[in-house]
Image (cartoon, rainbow, N blue to C red):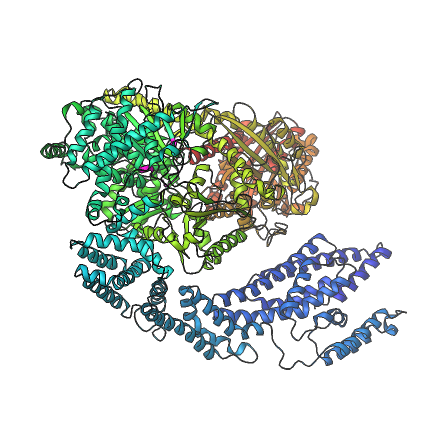
Amino acid sequence: DSDYLTLHECIHILVLTDHHIGKHIPVASTESKFLKKHALNTFLGICKKAQGILESTNKSEFETIFPDYRDSVLYLPWMMVTGEAKKEFKLTNQFLHDALVKDISEINEFLENFDFAKLKTKVQSTRIFGGFLADHCLLLRERVKTSDHLEGDQWLDAIFKLCSEFFSQCRSLNHIKYFAILEIPSSSSQNTIKKAYKSLAKRYHPDKTGEGDGTMFRKIKEAHDFLLENVDFSRENVDQPFDSLLRGVRTKLRERAKALLEEQQYKNVETLLFRLDDLKMLDNLANPHLKHTDTIDEIKKIIKGHVEKVRIDVDSNWSSHNYLALNENITDLKSMETHFKAYPEIFSSSWNCGIVQTVEKEIEELGQQARYYLRSHHTAKQNLDDFRRCFLNMGHVLVELPLFKSITKTVMCGVLESCLSHEWGYSFLFEFGLGLQRGDESSSEVDNQVAQLIVAEFSHFKEVLTMVWNQETSQKPADDTVHGIKGQYRNGKSIKELKIDKHQLLEFFHAFDAQYMKLLGEYIDPNADMKALVQKTVGIADQFRPLDCDSGWSREVKDQIPNILAGVFAVFTIRKSGDSYNRLVESDTSGMSKNLLMKPHNIQVLTLLSLFGCGSSSSSNLNSQLMQIRTGEGKSMILGAAAVILALLGFRPRCVCYSEYLSDRDFALFRDVFDDFNVKEHVKYSKITTLSEDATKAKGNIRVLTESLLRGQLEDVGSAPALIIARKSGGVTISPGKSKVRTTTKSTTDTKTEDGSFKSDTVSKTKKKVDKMIERKIIQPPEMSSIDRKEILLVDEVDVFFGSEFYGQTYNQVAQLREPEITDILIHIWIANKRGGRRQRLADIQALPAYSQLLKKIDGFKYVLDSEINLMIDQVRRIDEEPYYLHRDTDRIGYKVMDSISYEVTYGYRTVFAYLQEAERGNLKEKDSTLASALFIPLSCGQFSYANVSPERILGVSGTLSALGEYEYNVLAKYGVNTFMYVPSVYGESNFQFDKAGDGIRIETSVSDYYHSIVEHTHLFLKQKRSVIVFFSDNARLKDFTNSSFYRNLGRQKKLLTENMSKSDKEFAISKAATAGQVTISTAVFGRGTDFFCKDETVQRNGGVHVIQAFLSEEESEEIQIQGRTARQGKKGSYQMILLDSDLEKQFGLAKGWKDKIAKGNWYNHLSSARQKHREVVYEKIEENLANATEKDRNTHGYFDALLAKNEKAASKKFKEIYTSFKKGSLPSSIELDLAFIIDTTGSMAPYAQTAAATVKNLLTGSESIVAKLNINFPEIEFHLRVGVMGFRDIDDGPKQFSESISNEGSHFFSDTTTSISFVNFILRGPSGGGDIAEDILGAIHKAAKWNGPDDWTSPIKFMLLFTDAPAHGLVPEGSVNIPNVDGYSVRHPCGLTPERVVDSLIKNDIDLFLCSFNPAATLRTERELHTKYLDHKGNSEQREITVIPMVPENQRQSVEVLGGNGKHIIFVLDQSGSMSPYWSGVVEAYTKYIARRRQNQSDCDLVSVVQFDFCASVTVNMKPIAQVPDQLGYSGGGTYFLPAALSASELALSTPSSHVPAIVFMSDGCAYDSNQAASAFSQLNNTLRHQLECELELNVIAFGSGASHAQLKRIANSSKNGKFHTSADTAELSNIFVQIAGGDQVVDVLEAEIGKRISEAVSDRLAVEYVR
């Protein structure tokens, strides 16, 4: 009847009775114990039911069981002192709190997401549920607080806080203690209070209770009086919970809609519109009722008003020529049309509404008007202002309306071309352009910005830009400039000042200047013969060709360098600006035309003279040297002129830089000059990496040779020279350590013939080209062609030597192996990976027919195929690891390289599988042909060291020489560069501002503060009418910023500049970046070489462009380059760093808070010091890479030579060597491994303690140890093992739960394995504890993964080995959940641990988990759950898996889900014949030890039967629970017959419940005539069980004493494959056998070998991931 108070009284009476007269009434003790146990079980059942309800959607059912829950807690004090009851009470309260929190958060979530239907349902249910908790749970809380037998509960306190916040309406929660005294809810009325008082007053009246002082009665009276006096009972029209939230829906939606519209989040507005009709569901929820129609009308009105406003703004902004705002309007309308077109009442017509036609029409009209003004010179001059306004109006559209840029530029070009068609047109345009560039004081700042952008956009105004450049450069006299040149010579650590003969250098300069001006005056005339100038210059150079760099650089040569240089620059000046000059010079009265000439600056000339040794009077050789020229100050002119001079002197100059884009740009500057001097074929502009590539190509085609070798066709390949042009290269290069693969240039065109061979048309094309050259008479004279030209390297920025693609890296040759079987294998792996589940293994692929067929085609190269398949299996999971971009027009996949997307770069099989991914998505236009081209094996066949180059000399210019450190200087010294010179700026003193000691460096501690600081400082400079460029380290950080609300706070005048933008979009963003009010958000790659020219006078007047670098560069040179994006070419500019503390900690090891300990003025020096320390680590790695690259280069050349010699045997051998070395070539010489043993030391592990300890020892020591096996597999690596150990028990074992190895310094890992082995033996000396069957596996894994001692988990490869025989809490096998005492924490871990959280801790710490199970059936669900969470974890990019190692032989594993050897029906078949009389007591003792061991093994669910036999058989124990079996067995004595015993045992086995599995222990000391029949009976039983349970009978047969027939008993044991035969000489040995059998599934001796093998495989996988891919 749920009368718990009476129950308590009854039990109390029984306890008193037992205490005083128990000997007379013994039943009192039995009954009291029974009632207590029954009450406890009932309470535990109530808690489990409550927890289930609270996790369901129907929480109202909790109300029905709450009275039992409450009364059990309050009225059964003896129960609430038990650990089980306390735990479940606390857990249930936690469920109550979590359920309420979840409901409240879902209400807010549904409102935020405009899910009004779910909001209604959730509000209604939460009002009921929360109201019930406020009324009843809070009363329970108060009574718990005042109870003597209960402790306060944190979860009830948390519920009180929630109810006070959300459910205080109609409740006097501040007076809850008085309501609790009266045992009524806080929402009770006056009448209820009065009734409760009367009822309780009668119950607790002193006359009735006998209490003399009437304490309780007084409390009841006090509570009654207080409540009637202090509680306000006027509760009409009082709010319900969440009424205020619901009444605020209209306001919230209104403000939210406005905010979304303001932020242009039109997709979210579309969601709101879609769900507005559901608002009607909320009308009756609040008091007073809501009116959804009013809300809907208002929201739609707001949205429609926004649309109309933007439409009006379009017309208004177009009319007022506010093009910047108009562009924003058009962008908004296009987006709104996409999202609002389903609502015609809001968005009624297309976004353009004629605006496109209007704009295009006006542009055409403006063009016609402009042409009209240009119909004659008179009208042009007369209408100049109108023409300027007309042209500027078109310019505004060009600059500020990207949508119309193309048509506008076409029209404007037409206008300019029409002007040039007049004789007067050129001079008119020049003056017009000059006016645009200078600006007009009467014009607006925006007009002047646009005017300057127009000049930069159109080549028609190039002369204007030249004039501006000439005017802005600070052309100091050469005599002054020479004294600013400094130099140094470095020899190791010795640094000497370079002796520069400045007097001689000045003489050479004046010689140049005189000759240059002379030639310019003579040949700039349009009628002059340019060929004569060229021939004159070539003639001077011809005198000295060929020239020796070591001794031929005599004074005679140096004397002619100024003359050659003068001729080169004269040709350059005339080519670039001669026509402009000639067109204007006749009408020029002001001398302005001289500024039109593109002439070299004094410093550029002096730099070139210095490079060619003209400042060294004593030396007769050309020294390698580098010169510092500030970024953006004409390096391309210096390199171009140097290239021409060197080519004329018989050298082969190669200009190298870090960007192909910049290389092409610089080449284009001098292309005409190269043509004029006929040296273009001898001059090369490229990245530095092409040196090695070109040398390799000259030797032959290693890819074609390798493919032929694999197919056994090496003899069929043509001669080596022919290989160079034999077929498309189509090869790829893989950058070491990054898996980056770069496709080499395809220099030839092939046609595939019917027989599959390749036919090249290169030869015929070359012949035609030569014929054409002869015809044009530009082919070199024979004597010049025959010169053996030495290569001289011209370096643009010294960084090229230290970039990630050169020093220490290799140029990798990759053959493309294509076969149908390869396609089949790749597709199979792709499909298998897509299906999920277990990761594919090599063996799976080897079983495919395609594998065996392919192997026949490349006979002898199985190791290659297997290795490549392993790589495929690994990389199929990494497709998106490197973001790729699909060019939809060409079906090509590309990757980010510097500041652009390269479609020549691939990432091995990741790219191959990316094509399959895009094909599956339907994104390939030509699917079949694209896949046919993309699906192949990219086979590494050679690695040539980029650094293995030896140019004759290295000359160059760089803006970052001053940033070089000792290491960089040493590297340059290896290439013979020891001379360094520093020249002053072309533009004089720099106007660059960087306040290192002040606000120039800001370091923020949180991401939000970091982003806020960037925005705050950006606004600060924008208010000054300047422009701001923000550089983030990479796309990931930039994307994170742009997704934040901080980015939106930057306003509308912001542009992104990223690698994946189109070329035109990039150019537009770059051109706008340096204009007033503009914010540009960019990645670091645009901090090098990108010309953010500032032509905006407004920006300049106010301080120039401001650059914010939002990260600390790893290299100072990069920082200098980024700083060089502002204050360029003499302009003003400022720079600032805004850094994130955690970035500095992660990248440079600066502990958080360091800046608080250092004066701000020293911050920069501290950062620089940290960067230098980081660089030293990088340098060590570079040198290690260089050594590897050098060895690979040497081995590759050996292989290459064997191929060219067609020595198939030698080539095959060398290929295997280099292929294997490529796969392991970047492996380190030594690696540390962290290995943690997490060992279950609860009682159930007692049978396995010895085995577990032995396994650990064997894994750590001896020839079969982990390290020994790794040394066999990786002989080139020295492995260092560090071991940590944790023993764990269960949650309820309290302080004894965890035992951890830990050093005095706090580290859990030890390098000394002896210490770890000793600790394992210590914790396994006596396994105990555990309570229930499930164990705290999650807690143990999580705790170990979180070890954070000084040296914990610091190794690159980390493993955790968990030894257990039990499932984790909450993960008991489904077939075992009803077993008694199976899981005390089945619903929720008290620490909130879940498999997801535990796996998260493992993956975040990069730890691989091995689960070594002594009971695979028990741990199966745990394994599966962890395995699934591993695979699903978003951080598991490598798709690592839990490795499960069963610690029992396969034939002993149980086929059903039972725990720890539990769920067994053990049938003892014991011989009690006469001969056993002396030993029977020993047999019984062995039997009782078996029972004790099983119970120690937490196997209380076992059933036990006993068959005793002599000449007949009797069942003396029939399927009793193991806890109830007798500890004594009777004895009769007699003859020996086996068959009756076998039949009885079979009958018992077949009657075993489905929840159990039979196991027979058969013992005899004799022999029997019916042994064959008995064996047949057991065999028949085994067949039956195999059919029913799909398992073999567990049958242990023991031959006791010397009289037993081993043959007969072995025959019985062999009746089952799972049968075992034992021998025992005495009862002591018999006891040991019984205990061994009781221990459960026997552990095999070779398990440690299996563990070692699995770890070795895992290490191989990790090494493949880290070093091979």
Question: Residue 1277 versus residue 795: which sits nearer the camera?
Answer: 795
Q: Which residues are magenta?
A: 627-636
Q: Is residue 316 at all visible to an observer of this figure? A: yes
Looking at this view, is 616 or 883 the one in front? 616
Report whether 1427 appears left or right of 631: right
Taking depth in this image into account, of 1604 and 310 the one nearest to the observer is: 310
Q: Position of residue 989 (x, y in %)?
A: 43, 41
Quarter occupied by the N terminus = bottom right
Closer to the camera in the image, 1220 or 515: 515
Percent of width and height locating residue 774:
10, 32
Q: In the rendered view, would you say 1644 is above or below 119?
A: above
Q: Main secondary structure of the magenta part?
A: loop
Whether residue 1636 sits left or right of residue 1104 in the image: it is right
- Quarter assignment of residue 1329: top right
Q: Is residue 1205 above or below residue 1512?
A: above
Q: Residue at x 87, y 72 (%)?
A: 206
The answer, for residue 877, to whether it is visible in the render is no
The x and y percentages for residue 777 are 11, 32
Q: Residue at x 69, y 40 (%)?
A: 1529
Q: Is residue 628 a member of the stretch shown in magenta?
A: yes
Q: Residue furthest front?
A: 589
Is residue 728 shown above or below 494?
Answer: below
**Residue 641 x, y percent position in the rendering:** 27, 33
For residue 791, side relative to residue 48 (left or right): left
Q: How many marks?
A: 0
Q: Quadrant location of residue 126?
A: bottom right
- Single out the residue that lies furthest toward the top: 551
**Residue 160 vs residue 760: left or right?**
right
Give the residue drawn at x 45%, y 69%.
257
- The question of residue 1271 being in magenta is answered with no
The residue furthest right is 212
Q: Quadrant of the C terminus?
A: top left
